[in-house]
Image (cartoon, helix red, strand yellow):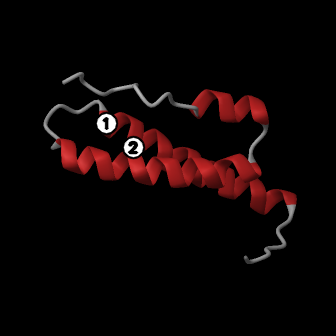
Amino acid sequence: MLGLLVNEKEIKEIEYLIKREMDEILFDLKDNRIDHIVKRAMEERYKILFTLFRRVASPNECLKYMRSDRVGRKKG
């Protein structure tokens, strides 16, 4: 485990960067041209980013980026 001391301005910057990356992933997940294997890797990355995001963002902000496991997946 690692510790990190950051001030409020740095937290806001980290939050902004993570949100931008998660927004980009969500946008790309809607693209039908992207292979499902690549999308699976993108979903895994999203989970990691969301875990980091939960540490710096408010609960209300987290709710905006929370995904269910079924979102964007086809049955079969």
Secondary structure found at label 2: helix
Q: Position of residue 24 (x, y in %)?
A: 41, 43
| Residue visible at 75% across and 29% down in the picture | 60
56 to the left or right of 33: right
| Residue visible at 19% across and 42% down in the picture | 36
Secondary structure found at label 1: helix
- Contact, mark 1 vs mark 2 (Cβ under 8 Å): yes
- Residue 5 against residue 17 in the figure, above or below: below
**Label for residue 76?**
none
Q: Residues within 10 Å of mark 1 (few under 14, many from 20)?
A: many
- Residue 27 against residue 14 in the figure, above or below: above
| The residue positioned farthest toward the front in the image shown | 76
Residue beneath disc 2? 25
Number of numbered tags placed on the structure image: 2
- Residue 26 against residue 70 in the figure, above or below: below
| Residue visible at 58% across and 32% down in the picture | 66
Q: Nearer the viewer, residue 35 or 17?
A: 35
Residue beneath disc 1? 29
| The residue positioned farthest toward the bottom in the image shown | 2
Q: Residues within 10 Å of mark 2 (few under 14, many from 20)?
A: some
| Residue visible at 54% across and 53% down in the picture | 49
Q: Amino acid at mark 1?
A: Leu
- Residue 46 against residue 75 in the figure, above or below: below
30 to the left or right of 11: left
Q: Position of residue 74 (x, y in %)?
A: 24, 24
Q: Where's the C terminus, which quadrant?
A: top left
48 to the left or right of 30: right
| The residue positioned farthest toward the top in the image shown | 75
Q: Where's the N terminus, which quadrant?
A: bottom right
Q: Amino acid at mark 2?
A: Ile
Q: Quadrant of residue 13?
A: bottom right
